[in-house]
Each structure stands twice: as C-alpha cells, then as structure tokens.
Image: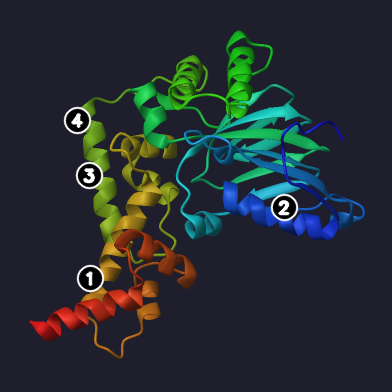
Amino acid sequence: MHSTGQTEPFYTGRQGFEAWHHDLAEKCGTFHAEPPTGSGATSFTGAMQNLSGSHPVLDGSRIISNCRHLHRARQDIRADDKDFYYLVLQVGGRAKMCQADNQARLGAGDLVLLDITQPCDFYFDDLSDQMSLIIPRHALQQRLGQRQPLFNQPLGATSTLGSMAGLLTQRLFDSSRLQPEEAFALFDALLALLRPGISTAPECENPGVQAQKLVKAKVLIEQYLRDSELSPERLAKAIGTSVRNLHRLFAQHDTSVGRYILEHRLQRCAESIARAAPQEKITAIAYAWGFNDVSHFSKAFKTRFGVSPRDYRYQNAATVAQG
C-alpha cells in the first residue's frame, strides 16, 4: 500500500471495515459499502483523514480503501440531511462515479464535482485514494453566478485547469499550518479556477419564466408534502424543466430542493404537534407529513427547533395551560 501521509486512522480486516464504514458515514454521509471481492471484509484495507480536524475553516475527508463499491440511496440522503457539494480528487487508483445519467471515469489527478443530495455510486478497480473537499452550496453558486454546475463531468489531470486545481486541492488538504485568511484565499482561488471547468451557461429562459417555475415547484411541494416519495425528479418533470435547473432555481435562494422540503415538513409537524390531542402519537404525525424514518425526524426536529418533538409538545401544552 502506498503512503497515506498524515491520513489516519488505519483500518484492516473485518473489524477495520466496520469501523471505517462508520467513520465514512459520520464524515461524508451515509454510504453502503461493498467490501473487496474474494475474501471480503477480512481482506479490507483502508484509512481516513478528516480535514476539519486539522483546520478550523476547511472541511472534507481523504478516503482510502480497497472497497469494491459505495452506494448512496435516496433514503440515505433523507436520513443524514447533508447538503453540500463535494469536489473529489482521485489521488491514486481508478474509480467510476455514477450520478443521474452521467458516468465519470477517474484516474490519478482527475477531479469531479458531486452533489451529495442526489443518489450516487462509486466503483473501484482496486485500492483507491480520494480527497473529497466540501464546497458549501452558497459559496459555489455565488462564484458561478447564472451558470449551472456540471456534476459528474470529470476535469482531467492532463488539462491546465485540472492540473492546477488538483495542486490547489492537495495544498488545501495540507493546510494545518495556514492561517484562516490564507485558507480562505486559496479556497476562493480554487473556485475561481474551477468555474469554466465545472459549470455551463444557464438554460435559455428569461428570468420571468424561471421565477414562474420556482413558484410552481413550491406550490407542488406544498401540495404533495405528505408524499414520502416526493423527489426532485418528480418535481422537475411536473414543472417542465431539468433536475439540474430545478436545483439551480433553489440554489439561487441559498437552499436546495431537499432542504426546502425538509424545512416545510418540520414546520407542519410542529404545528400539528402543538394542536394535537395528548393521545395522538408523535410518530403518526411524522409519518403523516412524509417522514418514513422516526430517528431521522427526531434528530432533524431537534436541530430545527432546539428541543425534541416530545419536549416541544410539553412546552406548548404548558403554554396553553398558563394561558
């Protein structure tokens, strides 16, 4: 195995595979991992480095493993609420990434932009070493302006943009000695460098038409908020646009389709909990508003309102009693 530099910890065997898989979910989002072929997890080798542990500004992970396949499904996306882009640099080994209708084959030094709010698959030939730098949605959209991000379209290491962006990405992963101002400057330079390689001109529609589509999408979300199968694909088809353009419409308002749906479901749940009869179960309310995972609902609710759904009910009951 090649040197992992400062990457840690190092994992081997079946127990190592389980620990690595857990850390992957904590740092990068929920993925289903398929161990190496042949002897399976007993022959697993991997390592992990969390960039946020070495710098207060930047975030991302360096992921090394000989896994055969990583898969992120829609239910995984709902469960962890991660909402950002990944700039993936293939440091070593080879990989194939699949998202929507696009496939990207990556060799050493190639980069690609990944939307973590959409299902995706990674397939690896052997030992793979990737650096995944988190790019906040608003930061990329501000840099792109009216241009649309291109997901899963590789930026080759042999191109001028690709080679320079790869060097900057690696430098950011070795940024523990950088001051925050220096790290911000490098990060901004990376986004500026990437702009022509990971974006394209917006769809040829005037702003008024785009605004109408956004309004229609929001109306449909309200209409089908109780449907747990509500998805960007269904919304895009219903309003007559591409999924990519739908995401861009919401990104212009510093949110995402998934985040917008989640926020509105949580608000409706809070309203229902506040006025529900004491015997009505909170889980039933969550299911009624499109949630199909109770633990995910509870976690998201507490993040949004600062208290658990049960405590929220008690607080509202006490307020009513005092009134």
Q: Which is in the foreground here, disc 3 or disc 1? A: 1
- Element type at marker 1? helix
Q: Residue at left 36%, top 65%?
A: 301
Q: Which is in the foreground here, disc 1 or disc 4? A: 1
How far separated are the C-alphas under marks 3 and 4?
A: 11 Å
- Badge 2 crowding class, 10 Å Cα cut-off, few under 14, some 14 to 19, many 20 or more, is many
Q: Residue at left 7%, top 82%?
A: 323
Q: Earlier in the sequence, mark 3 or mark 4?
A: 4
Q: Earlier in the sequence, mark 1 or mark 4?
A: 4
Question: Hey, what amino acid is under mark 1?
Answer: Glu
Q: Nearer the viewer, residue 175 or 215?
A: 175
Question: Hey, what amino acid is under mark 2?
Answer: Trp
Residue 124, x across and y down, in percent:
77, 39
Question: Hey, what amino acid is under mark 3?
Answer: Val
Give the residue at the far top of this rendering: 160
| Residue underneath mark 2 | 20
| Residue underneath mark 1 | 271
How far separated are the C-alphas under marks 3 and 2?
A: 43 Å
- Element type at marker 3? helix
Q: Earlier in the sequence, mark 3 or mark 2?
A: 2
Residue 73, x across and y down, in percent:
58, 54
Identify the image quadrant of residue 307: bottom left
Q: Which is in the foreground here, disc 4 or disc 2? A: 2
Q: Is residue 62 above or below residue 306?
A: above
Give the residue at the far right of this rendering: 39
Q: Residue at left 42%, top 48%?
A: 232
Give the residue at the far left of this rendering: 323
Question: Hey, what amino acid is under mark 4?
Answer: Gly
| Residue underneath mark 3 | 215
The reply, left or right, for residue 161 in relation to residue 307 is right
